Image (cartoon, grey):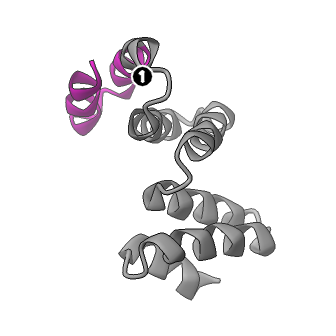
Amino acid sequence: YAALGVALAARGRHADAVAEFHRALALDPDHAPGMMDLTRSLMALDRFEEAFAWQERALAVDPTLPGARATAAGRYNVWELHDHAWRHVRAGLRLAPTDPSLLSQAILL
């Protein structure tokens, strides 16, 4: 189901992708990468609060997700909550010091 969700999201069919990601997470509720895939599709649908809840859940399950850290930093940067953004950038860079998305967030801060 997760692979189908990724394929649907790649085609811009985010509503359908969300349904597939939920099906996948029903089978494996602690699959943090699947939660991040769901987060991206929810963001594409402007369902930001739901997306951020899934993102936070993904980070609670697996705090080593650098992509999730970059997304969180970007969100907090846009909201001008720079201390929160730095927290995510620092945590992500400790795990993946050359991650381009984290480095770009660090530059923006």
Give above or below for 93 relative to 67: below
The residue at the point 64 percent across, 58 percent down is 75
Local SS, label 1: helix
The residue at the point 37 percent across, 76 percent down is 100
Give above or below for 73 relative to 37: below
State the predominant SS element of the stretch in magenta. Answer: helix
Query: Horizontal and vertical percent for residue 87?
Result: 70, 70
Residue position marked by numbered label 1 in the rendering: 18
Query: Horizontal and vertical percent for residue 26?
Result: 45, 12
Q: Could you say which quadrant of the image residue 24 lies in?
A: top left
Tell me, yes or no, if residue 80 can be seen here.
no
What is the number of callouts on the image? 1
Of residues 109 and 24, the one drawn nearer to the viewer in this rendering: 24
Residue at the far bottom in the pictured view: 107
Tell whether position 13 is magenta: yes
Tell whether position 26 is magenta: no
Give above or below for 89 relative to 35: below
Q: Is residue 10 left or right of residue 85?
A: left
Of residues 26 and 104, the one drawn nearer to the viewer in this rendering: 26
Q: Quadrant of the N terminus?
A: top left
Q: State the extent of the magenta-drawn residues as a range.
A: 1-22
Q: Is residue 4 left or right of residue 15?
A: left
- Amino acid type at image mark 1: Val
Query: Horizontal and vertical percent for residue 102?
Result: 48, 74
Q: Could you say which quadrant of the image residue 15 lies in?
A: top left
The residue at the point 47 percent across, 55 percent down is 65
Of residues 23 and 41, the one drawn nearer to the viewer in this rendering: 23
